[in-house]
Image (cartoon, rainbow, N blue to C red):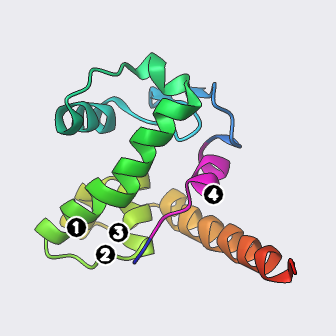
Amino acid sequence: MIIISLYIIALIESSNNPLAINEVSKAYGKYQITQPCLDDFNEAKNTSYSLQEMLSPQISSEVANWYLNARIPQMLKKLGLLDSVSNRLIAYNAGIGTLKNHKPLPKETRDYIKKYNKLRGEYEKKRQSIP
């Protein structure tokens, strides 16, 4: 079973800053939740969260966890695509359309995957060294 580390995503997206706002993409919170992601969550969960509420670590964690570990795998399955860490990260960073349309990965997304894998490896190494 694949589980994407929310902690690592928060480090990559915002340096784990719950008050981060990207003025260009209009992404909010430590996971940089965008309006389309939030709309998808609100519809699926029958909630009415606002982007401003993504500045709450608890609420944004709920949305990010659902999106990364439930919604993206659901979309990958529907499209007949492999549910892998890389595909989840691509969908989160560049959008599911990048995978659906077999578009070349933007450099930002390739770097995102490398950074995630590097941080994940460092985390695993630290975890194994603890008695």
Q: Which residue is mark 2?
A: 83
Which stretch is magenta? 3-13
**Element type at marker 3?**
loop
Q: CA distance from mark 3 to mark 1?
A: 17 Å
Q: Earlier in the sequence, mark 4 or mark 2?
A: 4
Q: Which residue is mark 3?
A: 104
How many residues crowd around disc 4 within 10 Å: few (fewer than 14), some, or many (20 or more)? some
Quadrant where the C terminus sits is bottom right
Q: Which residue is mark 1?
A: 76
Q: Looking at the image, can residue 101 be seen?
A: no
Amino acid found under the numbered disc labelled 2: Asp
Q: Earlier in the sequence, mark 2 or mark 1?
A: 1
For residue 45, which quarter of the picture? Answer: top left
CB atoms of marks 2 and 1 within 8 Å = yes
Q: Nearer the viewer, mark 3 or mark 1?
A: 1
Amino acid found under the numbered disc labelled 4: Ile
CB atoms of marks 3 and 4 within 8 Å = no
**Element type at marker 4?**
helix
Q: Earlier in the sequence, mark 3 or mark 4?
A: 4
